[in-house]
Amino acid sequence: MSGSDVKAKRVTETGSLGVGPARIRQIQVLSTTGTPRLTITDGNGGSTVLDLDFLASDSHSVNIPAEGIRVEDIYVSTLDAVSAMTVFYN
């Protein structure tokens, strides 16, 4: 028996992904020059669930262990020096 299907959503700016309750499984980031940083909260103004710094001008893949990070709403509150990111969730 398989688990629930993994979905993906690409974003280029801060805000809600609009997918409802979810588990974040993986994030892929394309950083630009400067000081790349990504912060995800549990909804707008919610607690920080992921806060990452990246090397500039590179692509990065972040795998989330076990069952992933559970949130009521995937909300990107900081997306500095990042041209795009894809969130894999279910």
Image (cartoon, rainbow, N blue to C red):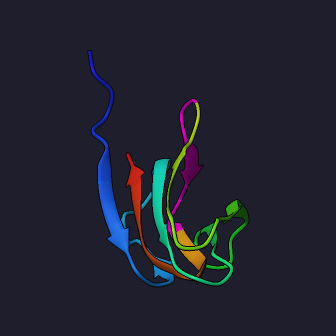
Q: Quadrant of residue 49?
A: bottom right
Q: Is residue 31 above or below residue 3?
A: below
59 or 13, which is in the foreground?
59
Count up the numbered dots.
Answer: 0
Measured as percent of width and height from the top left, residue 79 is found at 57, 79
Front position in the image: 52 or 69:
52
Magenta region: 66-74
Looking at this view, is 21 or 27 the one in front? 27
Q: Is residue 69 magenta?
A: yes
Residue at 41% of width from left, 71% of height from top? 17
Residue drawn at (56%, 41%) of the image: 64
- Residue 68 locus on image (x, y percent): 55, 40
Say if 54 sits above or below 78 in the image. above
- Direction top: furthest residue: 1
Q: Is residue 23 magenta?
A: no
Name the image quarter holding the N terminus.
top left
Q: In what quadrant of the picture does the C terminus appear?
A: top left
Q: Residue at x 53, y 59 (%)?
A: 72
Residue 27 percent across, percent down from the top left: 48, 55
Q: Residue 38: horizontal and vertical position, in percent? A: 62, 70
In the figure, is residue 23 to the left or right of 79? left
Left-right relation of 36 to 82:
right
At horizontal 40% and vertical 50% (from top left) the residue drawn is 89
